[in-house]
Amino acid sequence: MSFEETEARTGREWTKSTPDPLSWSDYGSFVSGVIRAPTRISVITIQPQYLTLAKLLDGRLFRIPEYQRAYSWTSHQRADLFSDITKTYAKGLDEGHFMAAVVCLRRTKQVLGTDEFHVLEVVDGQQRLTTLIIVLNTIKLKLDEEKKGESKLLRELGELLVKMEGDELLLLQTNHDTSFYFTNFLRAGLKEPSKKAKTLADREILEAIEDCEAFVSQWLLDGKTLPDLLSLLKNRLFFLLHEIDSEKAVYTVFEVLNSRGLEVSWIDRLKSILMEKERGSGSLPIAKPILRR
């Protein structure tokens, strides 16, 4: 799907029409999937795919690399997301909503049982992706196995979010989850009150779980059903997925994306620079202790 088609469907304003596939040797600003830089590097080939959330998550395992900041969305950003979902539902089955571009570094395939998964490192889009996965798990926990039609959904969500064939491997593995709040929530539905958090990263994850639970509960109080919400999330939320196949280039892309969304701290930017230098030279001992912080 071209960007003209995306613009017509979503009502978003795109500043440039972009062909498919995309190749650039200069990049420096990220506008509607277009990346141009002030410095010259080797050509990057990106294959943009316009996908529903269901297609985005199917056959993929997502990783948040260590140079990325921790989950940083607040209740304000989550409220905007919930509002977009509610408004999309009100528009009817023929309407969808474009969420965001998701930029990933393509890693190797991983075989779990008889299924193959593409492992992707998330360069941009982790905030929405993490929040939506928390919403999906909240729905799973509220589904009633005894209700007609919900037992199948419960099984499907369980298989999507936690891969039992891979020793309970998660669909999304986050960074900075030192207290395992995100991990325990996906694997066992365990949660702690946000006031118990000892770090900012922990607090944001725990508040996200609380906000998502409140959103799903309100959805039910408004007379809507869990299958309706799950159907909307899977089939009517759209993403533009960009997969980058150059490990060296991904750090430059990370720097480019700093000008968008939430502000990235100086230490996160320094991490990305040091990681690029270390991978390029193979010898930058100062990087390792910083990256572990």
Image (cartoon, rainbow, N blue to C red):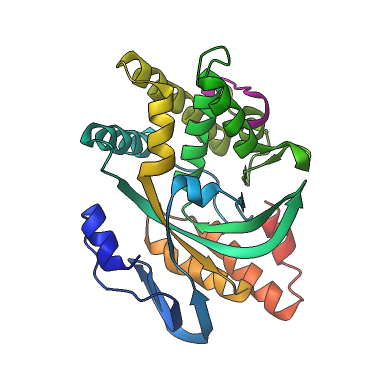
In-image side of 59 versus 50 (left or right) = right
9 on left or right of 173: left
Q: Is residue 226 above or below residue 249?
A: above
State yes or no: residue 25 in magenta: no
Q: Is residue 139 above or below residue 73?
A: above
Check the image and report above or below for 142 versus 95: above
Q: Nearer the viewer, residue 232 or 280?
A: 232
Q: Is residue 160 above or below residue 239?
A: above
Looking at the rendered structure, the number of numbered marks drawn on it comes to 0
Residue 211 coordinates in the image, percent (x, y): 43, 26
**In the image: residue 50, left or right of residue 172:** left
Of 280 and 195, nearer the camera is 280
Res 161 → quadrant: top right
Q: State whether residue 74 appears in this view.
A: no
> Which residue is at 60% across, 22% downward?
191
Q: Position of residue 214 (x, y in %)?
A: 41, 21
Residue drawn where x is 26% and y is 42% of the image: 94
Q: Is residue 207 shown to the viewer in this render?
A: yes
Say whether residue 160 is left or right of residue 86: right
**Quarter of the figure that contains the N terminus:** bottom left
The residue depicted at 48 percent of the width and 70 percent of the height is: 47
Q: Start and end of the magenta stretch?
A: 186-194
Q: Position of residue 2 (x, y in %)?
A: 32, 68
Tell me where residue 198 appears, x and y as whole percent. Answer: 60, 30
Q: Nearer the viewer, residue 265 or 56?
A: 56
